[in-house]
Protein backbone atom coordinates (compact mmCIF):
# COMPACT_ATOMS: atom_id res chain seq x y z
CA UNK A 1 0.00 0.00 0.00
CA UNK A 2 1.40 3.39 -0.94
CA UNK A 3 2.05 5.86 1.80
CA UNK A 4 0.21 9.19 1.71
CA UNK A 5 3.32 11.15 0.74
CA UNK A 6 4.28 8.75 -2.06
CA UNK A 7 0.72 8.72 -3.43
CA UNK A 8 0.70 12.52 -3.48
CA UNK A 9 4.00 12.61 -5.38
CA UNK A 10 2.73 10.11 -7.93
CA UNK A 11 -0.48 12.08 -8.47
CA UNK A 12 1.37 15.38 -8.67
CA UNK A 13 3.76 14.01 -11.29
CA UNK A 14 0.82 12.62 -13.27
CA UNK A 15 -0.89 16.01 -13.09
CA UNK A 16 2.16 17.89 -14.34
CA UNK A 17 2.46 15.45 -17.26
CA UNK A 18 -1.24 15.74 -18.13
CA UNK A 19 -1.43 19.53 -17.84
CA UNK A 20 1.65 20.04 -20.03
CA UNK A 21 0.22 18.09 -22.96
CA UNK A 22 -3.53 18.66 -22.63
CA UNK A 23 -5.42 21.95 -23.10
CA UNK A 24 -7.50 22.89 -20.06
CA UNK A 25 -11.23 23.27 -20.71
CA UNK A 26 -12.82 25.55 -18.11
CA UNK A 27 -16.36 24.69 -19.19
CA UNK A 28 -18.22 21.47 -19.98
CA UNK A 29 -17.17 20.36 -23.46
CA UNK A 30 -17.85 17.42 -25.77
CA UNK A 31 -15.14 15.56 -27.67
CA UNK A 32 -14.77 12.09 -29.16
CA UNK A 33 -14.11 10.67 -25.67
CA UNK A 34 -17.37 12.04 -24.27
CA UNK A 35 -18.22 14.94 -21.96
CA UNK A 36 -15.01 16.41 -20.54
CA UNK A 37 -13.87 19.18 -18.20
CA UNK A 38 -10.49 20.45 -17.08
CA UNK A 39 -7.39 18.77 -18.49
CA UNK A 40 -9.22 16.16 -20.53
CA UNK A 41 -11.00 14.58 -17.55
CA UNK A 42 -13.90 12.50 -18.89
CA UNK A 43 -17.09 13.01 -16.90
CA UNK A 44 -19.44 10.89 -19.04
CA UNK A 45 -17.82 8.50 -21.57
CA UNK A 46 -19.08 8.46 -25.14
CA UNK A 47 -22.06 6.14 -25.42
CA UNK A 48 -21.26 2.60 -26.49
CA UNK A 49 -24.48 1.55 -28.17
CA UNK A 50 -23.16 -1.95 -28.86
CA UNK A 51 -23.06 -2.62 -25.11
CA UNK A 52 -26.08 -0.41 -24.37
CA UNK A 53 -24.18 1.44 -21.67
CA UNK A 54 -26.50 3.52 -19.48
CA UNK A 55 -25.62 7.13 -18.85
CA UNK A 56 -26.85 6.70 -15.31
CA UNK A 57 -24.08 4.19 -14.62
CA UNK A 58 -21.54 7.00 -14.93
CA UNK A 59 -23.49 9.61 -12.96
CA UNK A 60 -22.33 8.90 -9.37
CA UNK A 61 -18.71 9.17 -10.51
CA UNK A 62 -19.47 12.30 -12.55
CA UNK A 63 -21.25 13.86 -9.56
CA UNK A 64 -18.15 13.36 -7.41
CA UNK A 65 -15.92 14.82 -10.13
CA UNK A 66 -18.11 17.90 -10.62
CA UNK A 67 -18.22 18.42 -6.87
CA UNK A 68 -14.43 18.34 -6.76
CA UNK A 69 -14.10 20.65 -9.76
CA UNK A 70 -16.55 23.33 -8.61
CA UNK A 71 -15.77 22.87 -4.90
CA UNK A 72 -19.43 22.94 -3.96
CA UNK A 73 -22.39 20.61 -3.77
CA UNK A 74 -23.86 19.79 -7.18
CA UNK A 75 -27.58 19.16 -7.12
CA UNK A 76 -28.99 16.06 -8.81
CA UNK A 77 -31.17 18.26 -11.05
CA UNK A 78 -28.00 19.25 -12.93
CA UNK A 79 -27.91 15.75 -14.37
CA UNK A 80 -31.35 16.05 -15.90
CA UNK A 81 -29.78 18.37 -18.44
CA UNK A 82 -26.41 16.59 -18.59
CA UNK A 83 -28.27 13.39 -19.44
CA UNK A 84 -30.18 15.16 -22.22
CA UNK A 85 -27.01 16.84 -23.48
CA UNK A 86 -25.16 13.51 -23.78
CA UNK A 87 -28.10 11.86 -25.53
CA UNK A 88 -28.47 14.77 -27.96
CA UNK A 89 -24.75 14.81 -28.70
CA UNK A 90 -24.79 11.09 -29.37
CA UNK A 91 -27.60 11.61 -31.90
CA UNK A 92 -25.61 14.33 -33.62
CA UNK A 93 -27.83 17.19 -32.42
CA UNK A 94 -25.00 19.34 -31.17
CA UNK A 95 -26.91 22.59 -30.84
CA UNK A 96 -29.46 21.14 -28.43
CA UNK A 97 -26.63 19.43 -26.55
CA UNK A 98 -25.02 22.83 -26.02
CA UNK A 99 -28.34 24.27 -24.85
CA UNK A 100 -28.76 21.57 -22.21
CA UNK A 101 -25.20 22.17 -21.01
CA UNK A 102 -26.11 25.83 -20.56
CA UNK A 103 -29.24 24.87 -18.62
CA UNK A 104 -27.14 22.98 -16.05
CA UNK A 105 -26.13 26.36 -14.66
CA UNK A 106 -22.52 25.17 -14.39
CA UNK A 107 -20.39 27.98 -15.74
CA UNK A 108 -16.64 28.17 -16.15
CA UNK A 109 -14.42 26.84 -13.39
CA UNK A 110 -13.64 29.77 -11.11
CA UNK A 111 -10.38 28.27 -9.92
CA UNK A 112 -8.98 27.82 -13.42
CA UNK A 113 -5.91 25.60 -13.39
CA UNK A 114 -6.23 24.80 -9.67
CA UNK A 115 -9.82 23.60 -10.20
CA UNK A 116 -8.69 21.47 -13.14
CA UNK A 117 -5.94 20.01 -10.93
CA UNK A 118 -8.44 19.22 -8.18
CA UNK A 119 -10.68 17.51 -10.73
CA UNK A 120 -7.76 15.48 -12.10
CA UNK A 121 -6.76 14.32 -8.61
CA UNK A 122 -10.31 13.18 -7.83
CA UNK A 123 -10.47 11.31 -11.14
CA UNK A 124 -7.20 9.51 -10.39
CA UNK A 125 -8.40 8.51 -6.93
CA UNK A 126 -11.62 7.11 -8.38
CA UNK A 127 -9.61 5.20 -10.98
CA UNK A 128 -7.49 3.77 -8.15
CA UNK A 129 -10.60 2.34 -6.49
CA UNK A 130 -11.97 5.12 -4.30
CA UNK A 131 -15.77 5.29 -4.10
CA UNK A 132 -17.60 8.44 -5.24
CA UNK A 133 -19.04 8.85 -1.76
CA UNK A 134 -15.51 8.89 -0.37
CA UNK A 135 -14.67 11.92 -2.52
CA UNK A 136 -17.85 13.68 -1.39
CA UNK A 137 -17.22 12.99 2.28
CA UNK A 138 -13.62 14.17 1.96
CA UNK A 139 -14.93 17.52 0.70
CA UNK A 140 -17.44 17.71 3.59
CA UNK A 141 -20.37 17.88 1.19
CA UNK A 142 -23.42 15.78 1.97
CA UNK A 143 -24.57 14.18 -1.25
CA UNK A 144 -25.53 10.52 -1.37
CA UNK A 145 -24.46 8.95 -4.63
CA UNK A 146 -26.70 5.86 -4.30
CA UNK A 147 -29.83 8.02 -3.84
CA UNK A 148 -28.74 10.19 -6.75
CA UNK A 149 -28.18 7.18 -9.00
CA UNK A 150 -31.71 5.98 -8.39
CA UNK A 151 -33.23 9.42 -8.89
CA UNK A 152 -35.53 9.89 -11.85
CA UNK A 153 -36.20 13.10 -13.73
CA UNK A 154 -37.63 16.10 -11.92
CA UNK A 155 -41.39 15.89 -12.21
CA UNK A 156 -41.73 19.67 -12.08
CA UNK A 157 -40.07 20.17 -15.46
CA UNK A 158 -42.32 20.64 -18.51
CA UNK A 159 -42.01 17.53 -20.63
CA UNK A 160 -43.17 16.10 -23.93
CA UNK A 161 -45.61 13.22 -23.29
CA UNK A 162 -44.16 9.76 -23.90
CA UNK A 163 -45.48 7.77 -26.81
CA UNK A 164 -46.30 10.74 -29.02
CA UNK A 165 -44.21 9.43 -31.89
CA UNK A 166 -41.52 12.07 -31.27
CA UNK A 167 -38.42 12.07 -29.13
CA UNK A 168 -40.46 11.61 -25.94
CA UNK A 169 -39.34 12.62 -22.49
CA UNK A 170 -37.39 15.69 -23.61
CA UNK A 171 -37.85 19.05 -21.95
CA UNK A 172 -39.99 21.57 -23.81
CA UNK A 173 -39.31 25.31 -23.97
CA UNK A 174 -35.57 25.03 -23.35
CA UNK A 175 -35.06 28.25 -25.30
CA UNK A 176 -37.52 30.00 -23.00
CA UNK A 177 -35.66 28.69 -19.94
CA UNK A 178 -32.42 30.13 -21.27
CA UNK A 179 -34.01 33.54 -21.77
CA UNK A 180 -35.61 33.67 -18.33
CA UNK A 181 -32.59 32.51 -16.35
CA UNK A 182 -29.77 33.90 -18.43
CA UNK A 183 -26.51 33.18 -16.65
CA UNK A 184 -23.28 34.43 -18.19
CA UNK A 185 -22.58 30.90 -19.39
CA UNK A 186 -26.04 30.55 -20.97
CA UNK A 187 -25.70 33.93 -22.66
CA UNK A 188 -22.40 32.88 -24.21
CA UNK A 189 -23.96 29.68 -25.55
CA UNK A 190 -26.92 31.62 -26.97
CA UNK A 191 -24.49 33.93 -28.76
CA UNK A 192 -22.71 30.87 -30.19
CA UNK A 193 -26.03 29.45 -31.39
CA UNK A 194 -27.06 32.77 -32.97
CA UNK A 195 -23.73 32.97 -34.80
CA UNK A 196 -24.44 29.62 -36.51
CA UNK A 197 -27.89 30.70 -37.67
CA UNK A 198 -28.88 32.85 -40.63
CA UNK A 199 -29.15 36.57 -39.73
CA UNK A 200 -32.85 36.16 -38.85
CA UNK A 201 -33.92 32.70 -37.66
CA UNK A 202 -36.09 30.81 -35.18
CA UNK A 203 -34.70 27.98 -33.08
CA UNK A 204 -36.11 26.27 -29.96
CA UNK A 205 -39.08 28.65 -30.03
CA UNK A 206 -36.76 31.66 -29.90
CA UNK A 207 -36.41 34.32 -32.61
CA UNK A 208 -32.82 35.50 -33.15
CA UNK A 209 -32.08 38.64 -35.16
CA UNK A 210 -29.48 41.45 -35.32
CA UNK A 211 -30.33 44.82 -33.80
CA UNK A 212 -29.46 47.79 -35.98
CA UNK A 213 -27.64 50.71 -34.41
CA UNK A 214 -29.12 54.16 -34.65
CA UNK A 215 -32.61 55.56 -34.26
CA UNK A 216 -34.25 54.29 -37.44
CA UNK A 217 -37.28 52.01 -37.24
CA UNK A 218 -36.50 48.31 -37.74
CA UNK A 219 -38.89 45.61 -38.97
CA UNK A 220 -38.22 41.89 -38.59
CA UNK A 221 -40.33 39.28 -40.42
CA UNK A 222 -40.44 36.04 -38.42
CA UNK A 223 -39.24 33.09 -40.58
CA UNK A 224 -41.86 30.38 -41.03
CA UNK A 225 -44.69 32.61 -39.76
CA UNK A 226 -46.11 34.72 -42.63
CA UNK A 227 -47.65 37.95 -41.39
CA UNK A 228 -45.87 37.90 -38.04
CA UNK A 229 -43.33 40.66 -37.53
CA UNK A 230 -41.51 42.66 -34.87
CA UNK A 231 -41.23 46.41 -35.29
CA UNK A 232 -38.73 48.41 -33.26
CA UNK A 233 -39.75 52.01 -32.71
CA UNK A 234 -37.33 54.82 -33.45
CA UNK A 235 -36.53 55.32 -29.76
CA UNK A 236 -34.80 51.89 -29.77
CA UNK A 237 -36.48 50.78 -26.53
CA UNK A 238 -40.03 49.90 -27.60
CA UNK A 239 -41.04 46.98 -29.81
CA UNK A 240 -44.39 46.07 -31.34
CA UNK A 241 -45.23 42.45 -32.20
CA UNK A 242 -47.83 42.43 -34.98
CA UNK A 243 -49.74 39.33 -36.09
CA UNK A 244 -51.65 40.19 -39.26
CA UNK A 245 -53.47 36.84 -39.28
CA UNK A 246 -55.59 37.77 -36.25
CA UNK A 247 -54.87 41.48 -35.71
CA UNK A 248 -53.09 40.90 -32.38
CA UNK A 249 -50.51 43.43 -31.25
CA UNK A 250 -48.16 43.10 -28.30
CA UNK A 251 -45.96 45.88 -26.94
CA UNK A 252 -42.62 44.97 -25.38
CA UNK A 253 -40.03 47.29 -23.91
CA UNK A 254 -36.30 47.04 -23.37
CA UNK A 255 -35.43 47.48 -19.71
CA UNK A 256 -32.21 47.48 -17.74
CA UNK A 257 -29.46 44.98 -18.60
CA UNK A 258 -31.00 44.38 -22.03
CA UNK A 259 -34.08 42.58 -20.69
CA UNK A 260 -37.22 42.74 -22.87
CA UNK A 261 -40.54 42.74 -20.95
CA UNK A 262 -44.17 42.78 -22.01
CA UNK A 263 -46.89 45.05 -20.57
CA UNK A 264 -47.32 42.68 -17.60
CA UNK A 265 -43.62 42.86 -16.78
CA UNK A 266 -42.84 39.29 -17.91
CA UNK A 267 -39.45 38.57 -19.45
CA UNK A 268 -39.99 37.85 -23.17
CA UNK A 269 -36.52 38.42 -24.58
CA UNK A 270 -32.94 39.56 -24.15
CA UNK A 271 -30.35 41.66 -25.91
CA UNK A 272 -27.37 39.30 -26.08
CA UNK A 273 -23.75 40.28 -25.39
CA UNK A 274 -22.98 40.45 -29.11
CA UNK A 275 -25.81 42.97 -29.71
CA UNK A 276 -28.23 40.52 -31.33
CA UNK A 277 -31.71 40.03 -29.90
CA UNK A 278 -33.48 36.84 -28.76
CA UNK A 279 -37.28 36.87 -28.29
CA UNK A 280 -39.49 34.10 -26.87
CA UNK A 281 -42.12 33.58 -29.58
CA UNK A 282 -44.36 31.52 -27.29
CA UNK A 283 -44.66 34.55 -25.01
CA UNK A 284 -45.26 37.27 -27.60
CA UNK A 285 -47.24 35.25 -30.18
CA UNK A 286 -48.69 32.18 -28.41
CA UNK A 287 -51.18 31.44 -31.19
CA UNK A 288 -48.29 31.04 -33.66
CA UNK A 289 -46.16 28.61 -31.69
CA UNK A 290 -46.50 25.07 -30.43
CA UNK A 291 -43.97 24.84 -27.59
CA UNK A 292 -44.87 21.22 -26.90
CA UNK A 293 -43.32 20.16 -30.21
CA UNK A 294 -39.68 19.12 -29.79
CA UNK A 295 -37.15 20.12 -32.42
CA UNK A 296 -36.16 17.05 -34.42
CA UNK A 297 -33.57 18.63 -36.72
CA UNK A 298 -30.16 20.04 -35.74
CA UNK A 299 -29.14 23.62 -36.42
CA UNK A 300 -28.20 24.41 -40.06
CA UNK A 301 -24.51 24.88 -40.85
CA UNK A 302 -22.75 26.17 -43.99
CA UNK A 303 -22.58 23.42 -46.63
CA UNK A 304 -18.98 23.56 -47.82
CA UNK A 305 -19.51 20.76 -50.32
CA UNK A 306 -22.57 22.14 -52.13
CA UNK A 307 -22.39 23.88 -55.50
CA UNK A 308 -22.20 27.67 -55.60
CA UNK A 309 -24.99 30.24 -55.89
CA UNK A 310 -26.58 30.40 -59.34
CA UNK A 311 -25.63 26.80 -60.19
CA UNK A 312 -28.13 24.18 -61.32
CA UNK A 313 -27.13 21.98 -58.40
CA UNK A 314 -27.90 24.76 -55.89
CA UNK A 315 -31.23 25.47 -57.61
CA UNK A 316 -32.23 21.81 -57.26
CA UNK A 317 -31.18 21.70 -53.61
CA UNK A 318 -33.35 24.76 -52.95
CA UNK A 319 -36.28 23.08 -54.73
CA UNK A 320 -35.89 20.01 -52.51
CA UNK A 321 -35.67 22.20 -49.40
CA UNK A 322 -38.88 23.98 -50.35
CA UNK A 323 -40.58 20.62 -50.96
CA UNK A 324 -39.43 19.11 -47.67
CA UNK A 325 -40.10 22.12 -45.42
CA UNK A 326 -42.48 24.43 -47.32
CA UNK A 327 -43.23 26.66 -44.31
CA UNK A 328 -39.64 27.23 -43.25
CA UNK A 329 -37.10 26.03 -45.85
CA UNK A 330 -33.49 25.61 -44.79
CA UNK A 331 -31.55 28.60 -46.18
CA UNK A 332 -29.77 28.21 -49.50
CA UNK A 333 -26.18 27.12 -49.09
CA UNK A 334 -26.83 25.66 -45.64
CA UNK A 335 -26.96 21.99 -44.69
CA UNK A 336 -27.54 19.81 -41.63
CA UNK A 337 -24.54 18.16 -39.94
CA UNK A 338 -24.64 14.94 -37.94
CA UNK A 339 -21.66 13.36 -36.25
CA UNK A 340 -20.57 9.97 -37.62
CA UNK A 341 -19.74 7.73 -34.62
CA UNK A 342 -18.00 5.28 -36.98
CA UNK A 343 -15.52 7.97 -38.01
CA UNK A 344 -14.56 9.39 -34.62
CA UNK A 345 -17.44 11.86 -34.53
CA UNK A 346 -16.53 13.56 -37.81
CA UNK A 347 -19.39 15.61 -39.25
CA UNK A 348 -21.43 14.39 -42.21
CA UNK A 349 -23.36 17.20 -43.90
CA UNK A 350 -26.78 16.47 -45.41
CA UNK A 351 -28.64 18.85 -47.72
CA UNK A 352 -31.61 19.13 -45.35
CA UNK A 353 -33.68 17.61 -42.54
CA UNK A 354 -37.46 17.28 -42.59
CA UNK A 355 -38.72 19.27 -39.59
CA UNK A 356 -41.86 17.21 -39.01
CA UNK A 357 -40.15 13.79 -38.95
CA UNK A 358 -36.40 14.30 -38.49
CA UNK A 359 -35.76 12.52 -41.83
CA UNK A 360 -32.34 13.39 -43.28
CA UNK A 361 -32.37 14.59 -46.88
CA UNK A 362 -29.91 14.39 -49.79
CA UNK A 363 -30.49 16.05 -53.19
CA UNK A 364 -29.02 14.82 -56.49
CA UNK A 365 -29.88 17.28 -59.22
CA UNK A 366 -29.77 17.06 -63.02
CA UNK A 367 -26.03 17.68 -63.12
CA UNK A 368 -25.56 14.38 -61.30
CA UNK A 369 -27.29 12.56 -64.16
CA UNK A 370 -25.04 14.38 -66.64
CA UNK A 371 -21.99 13.24 -64.67
CA UNK A 372 -23.20 9.62 -64.77
CA UNK A 373 -23.65 9.73 -68.54
CA UNK A 374 -20.23 11.29 -69.15
CA UNK A 375 -18.53 8.88 -66.74
CA UNK A 376 -20.06 5.88 -68.49
CA UNK A 377 -18.81 7.07 -71.88
CA UNK A 378 -15.32 7.73 -70.48
CA UNK A 379 -15.03 4.48 -68.50
CA UNK A 380 -14.99 6.39 -65.20
CA UNK A 381 -18.36 5.10 -64.00
CA UNK A 382 -16.76 2.87 -61.36
CA UNK A 383 -15.12 5.89 -59.75
CA UNK A 384 -18.42 7.78 -59.59
CA UNK A 385 -20.29 4.81 -58.13
CA UNK A 386 -17.55 4.27 -55.56
CA UNK A 387 -17.97 7.87 -54.44
CA UNK A 388 -21.73 7.36 -54.24
CA UNK A 389 -21.27 4.25 -52.09
CA UNK A 390 -18.85 6.06 -49.78
CA UNK A 391 -21.20 9.02 -49.33
CA UNK A 392 -24.26 6.85 -48.74
CA UNK A 393 -22.44 4.72 -46.16
CA UNK A 394 -21.26 7.80 -44.23
CA UNK A 395 -24.79 9.16 -44.24
CA UNK A 396 -26.30 5.86 -43.07
CA UNK A 397 -23.78 5.69 -40.23
CA UNK A 398 -24.36 9.30 -39.17
CA UNK A 399 -28.16 9.13 -39.50
CA UNK A 400 -28.38 6.18 -37.11
CA UNK A 401 -32.06 5.58 -36.31
CA UNK A 402 -33.19 8.59 -38.36
CA UNK A 403 -34.91 7.90 -41.70
CA UNK A 404 -32.90 8.86 -44.78
CA UNK A 405 -34.33 10.06 -48.12
CA UNK A 406 -32.52 10.86 -51.36
CA UNK A 407 -34.13 13.02 -54.06
CA UNK A 408 -33.12 12.62 -57.73
CA UNK A 409 -34.05 14.91 -60.60
CA UNK A 410 -34.15 12.04 -63.12
CA UNK A 411 -35.63 8.55 -63.10
CA UNK A 412 -32.55 6.90 -64.57
CA UNK A 413 -30.25 8.12 -61.80
CA UNK A 414 -32.82 7.16 -59.16
CA UNK A 415 -33.17 3.62 -60.56
CA UNK A 416 -29.40 3.17 -60.70
CA UNK A 417 -29.12 4.27 -57.07
CA UNK A 418 -31.86 1.85 -55.92
CA UNK A 419 -30.12 -1.09 -57.59
CA UNK A 420 -26.73 -0.07 -56.24
CA UNK A 421 -28.02 0.35 -52.68
CA UNK A 422 -29.79 -3.01 -52.83
CA UNK A 423 -26.64 -4.84 -53.96
CA UNK A 424 -24.31 -3.08 -51.51
CA UNK A 425 -26.75 -2.64 -48.64
CA UNK A 426 -24.83 -2.44 -45.29
CA UNK A 427 -27.74 -0.27 -44.17
CA UNK A 428 -28.20 1.48 -47.50
CA UNK A 429 -31.46 -0.39 -48.01
CA UNK A 430 -32.99 2.06 -45.50
CA UNK A 431 -32.50 4.94 -47.96
CA UNK A 432 -35.78 6.00 -49.56
CA UNK A 433 -35.15 7.03 -53.17
CA UNK A 434 -37.58 9.62 -54.58
CA UNK A 435 -37.81 11.27 -58.01
CA UNK A 436 -38.51 15.00 -57.92
CA UNK A 437 -38.24 16.39 -61.47
CA UNK A 438 -36.35 19.65 -61.98
CA UNK A 439 -38.31 22.10 -64.13
CA UNK A 440 -35.77 24.92 -64.20
CA UNK A 441 -33.00 25.62 -66.67
CA UNK A 442 -30.21 23.05 -66.78
CA UNK A 443 -27.65 25.57 -67.97
Image: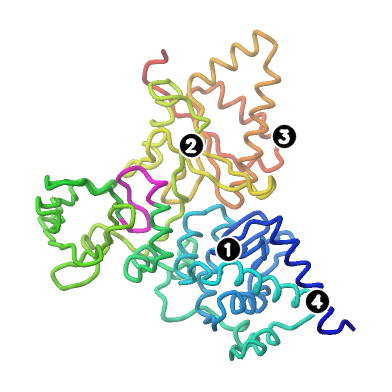
Sequence-earlier tag: 4 or 3: 4
Q: Mark 4 or mark 3: which is in front?
A: 4
Q: Which mark is residue 128?
A: 4
Task: Count residues near mark 4 (Cα–Cα under 10 Å), then give few for <14, some for 14-19, many for 20+.
Answer: few
Q: Which residue is mark 1?
A: 86
Q: Residue at x 17, y 67 (%)?
A: 262
Q: Are marks 2 and 4 in contact (CB under 8 Å)?
A: no
**Vertical position of residue 424 compared to residue 300: above or below:** above
The residues tagged by marks 4 and 3 sit, at their Cα atoms, a distance apart of 47 Å
Q: Nearer the viewer, mark 3 or mark 2?
A: 2
Residue shown at the point (82%, 78%) measured from the top left? 7
Q: Is residue 91 above or below residue 37?
A: above
Write the residue at 40% across / 36% down: 321
How far across and down, in percent of the image, does residue 74 sit?
54, 80
Question: CA–CA distance between discs 3 and 1?
Answer: 32 Å
Q: How many marks overall?
A: 4
Q: Which numbered tag is attached to residue 351?
A: 2
What element does badge 3 sit on?
Answer: loop
Residue at which label 3 appears:
424
The picture places residue 57, in percent across and down from the top left corner, at 68, 74
The segment highlighted magenta reads 194-206
Residue ID at (58%, 61%): 25
The front one of 358 and 264 is: 264
Amino acid sequence: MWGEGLLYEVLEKAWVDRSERTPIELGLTFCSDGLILGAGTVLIPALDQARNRSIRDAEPRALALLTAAYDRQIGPSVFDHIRCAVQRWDRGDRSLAEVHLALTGLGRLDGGRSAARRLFMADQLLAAGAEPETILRAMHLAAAAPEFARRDTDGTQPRVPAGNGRISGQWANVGKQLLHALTQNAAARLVTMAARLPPVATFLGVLFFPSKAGGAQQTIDVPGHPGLRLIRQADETHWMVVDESNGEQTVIQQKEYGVLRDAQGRVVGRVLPNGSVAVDLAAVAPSRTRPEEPRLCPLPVPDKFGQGPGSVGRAYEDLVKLTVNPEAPTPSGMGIALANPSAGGKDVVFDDCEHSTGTMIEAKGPTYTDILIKAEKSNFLTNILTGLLDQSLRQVQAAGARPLRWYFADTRAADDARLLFARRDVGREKIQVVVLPFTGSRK
